[in-house]
Amino acid sequence: MLATVLGRLRVIGIIEAISFLVLLLIAMPLKYFADYPDAVTVVGMAHGVLFVLYLLAVVNALAARKLSWAMSAFAVIAAFLPFGPFIVDRKIR
């Protein structure tokens, strides 16, 4: 799956989406309800790195002509939504 441009995009997208959900559903409640801000620091940094990798994977797929401009724009916009990369994964499958 990691051998192709779209395979890498799909894997990175799924991991990035999971990190976003962990940030929103686990780390943020720990910060605000359990007074444990370190969770957001660690998970937030990991999510930030994965977010950048996802955007680079989208640009790589666009450059390799595996995604259209419209699909690339959709993938970038979807990155800002909690379940967005899962939707992109379904569309490019």
Image (cartoon, rainbow, N blue to C red):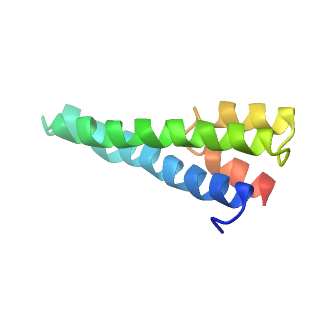
In the picture, the quarter occupied by the C terminus is bottom right
Pick out the residue farthest to the bottom.
1
Identify the residue shown where x is 17% and y is 38%. 38
Please indicate whether residue 56 sits to the left or right of residue 5 in the image. Answer: left
Identify the residue shown where x is 80% and y is 45%. 64
Image-quadrant location for residue 65: top right
Residue 69 % position (x, y): 85, 32
Residue 14 % position (x, y): 56, 55
**One can see residue 29 in this view:** no
Image-quadrant location for residue 67: top right
**One can see residue 87 in this view:** yes
In the picture, the quarter occupied by the N terminus is bottom right
| Labels in figure, total | 0
Residue 85 % position (x, y): 63, 46
Identify the residue shown where x is 33% and y is 37%. 45
Please indicate whether residue 85 sits to the left or right of residue 93 in the image. Answer: left
Identify the residue shown where x is 43% and y is 39%. 49
Residue 66 % position (x, y): 83, 49
Depth check: 43 or 68 in front?
68
> Is residue 57 placed above or below 31 in the rendered structure?
below
Pick out the residue farthest to the left.
35
Depth check: 30 or 55 in front?
55
Please indicate whether residue 35 sits to the left or right of residue 49 in the image. Answer: left
